[in-house]
Amino acid sequence: MSATGEPVRIGIVGVGVIGRRHLQLAVADERCSVVAVADPDPATAAAASGAGVTRYRSCRTMLDNERVEGVIVAAPTQSHAEIGRELACRGLPMLMEKPFTDTLESGLDLVRAASSAGVAISVGHHRRFDPAVGSARNILGSGEIGRLVGVSGIWAARKPDSYFEVSWRRSQGGGPVLINMIHDIDMLRHLCGEIESVYADTASRNRGLPVEDSGAIVLRFADGPLATISFSDAAPSPWGWERATADNPSIPPSGENCYHFFGSAGSLGFPRLQVWKYEPGGEPGWSRRITRTERTLPPRAALAAQLRNFCDVVRGKAKPLVGARDALATLAAAQAVHRSAREGRPVRPAFSHHG
């Protein structure tokens, strides 16, 4: 329940896979009340009916007929800018799913429109709400493992063939770079700082579709560390954020670390938060015994925590944890992956949060 004693009146645009998760969480949370959803696909009527809310075919029709205080946008990325401008014109705070927009230009236009209207934008890089991310940021920032030298990451899973029956997943923007890796890029920006350059290569031979299915990325951060990420949506593995954390309830967890941060005084297995360091005494070196300690974490509920933050943003009690300009820097780095793969050279992201 909000500070006013009334739940925040929420509308949801887009009731696909992630939109349905937003719908389920919002219906279950007493801080908010879902008053309606909007989606042109007739198949979404059942989800709306099951949640006991009205379904409209368009965002504009929903807003014309319902009193909402904030809107969650989980529609296809290419529609984000248009929907966002409509919300800004109506003075409505929004939680925009990632990627924020399909181009940097449309994203900057939306940022300007929202700023002129005094409208807050939160962006759905929900992993930042995971307790392991906050703990890792503290470990890295405190110098517990010394100066950060590098990061190694893996995200590999086999998406079922039926996943690609949706046409947009077989074309540019439907591959793992903008659907999956953008989360990892955002998390590494949050933990390691701004990305100075991106060097990447991608492949599509495993599925034979026009969009990438696998690749490798090298990120250079402004403060010096390097990160490598290997990824594929065509290879079964226990390594990846969803497997590691049970973040997605439809993906059974493995509990395996998918990232390793290594510093001048120790290393960190993540997201299990396993700190590896030499035993004390004598000169540090590879001949010394190395030991592991592991941190405990509270239960994970990143999407629910993101929803609570958004309700506070709507009420003016908090700022977005991930704002629009921050998300645009992540989008620029993800787009640099595609550009680097095309051009075969390192690429500097076209936008920096602090630039």
Image: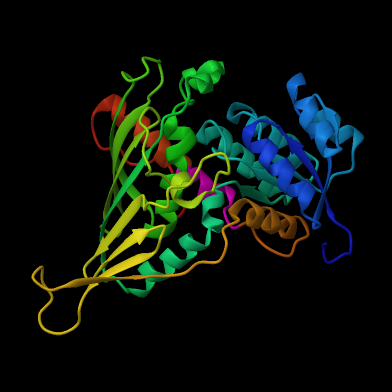
Residue 221 image position (x, y, % from top left)? 31, 53
Residue drawn at x 32%, y 73% is 143
Give residue 18's position: percent from left, percent from top. Answer: 63, 37
Residue under the point 36% across and 14% down = 208
Residue 323: say if magenta.
yes
Q: Is residue 335 magenta?
A: no
On screen, residue 258 versus residue 57, left or right, reads left
Quick one: which residue is furthest to the bottom in this view?
A: 281
Q: How is the image coloured?
A: rainbow
Spot occupied by residue 248 in the image (x, y as percentages of width and height): 55, 44
Q: Which residues are the magenta region?
A: 321-330
Q: Nearer the viewer, residue 348 or 226?
A: 226
Q: Judge by depth and name the residue closer to the eye, 139 or 161.
A: 161
- Decide whether the magenta segment is chiefly helix, strand or loop: helix
Left or right: 329, with 91 as reference point: left
Asked whether residue 93 is in view, the answer is no
Please say whether residue 316 is visible from this viewpoint.
yes
Q: Quadrant of residue 149?
A: bottom left
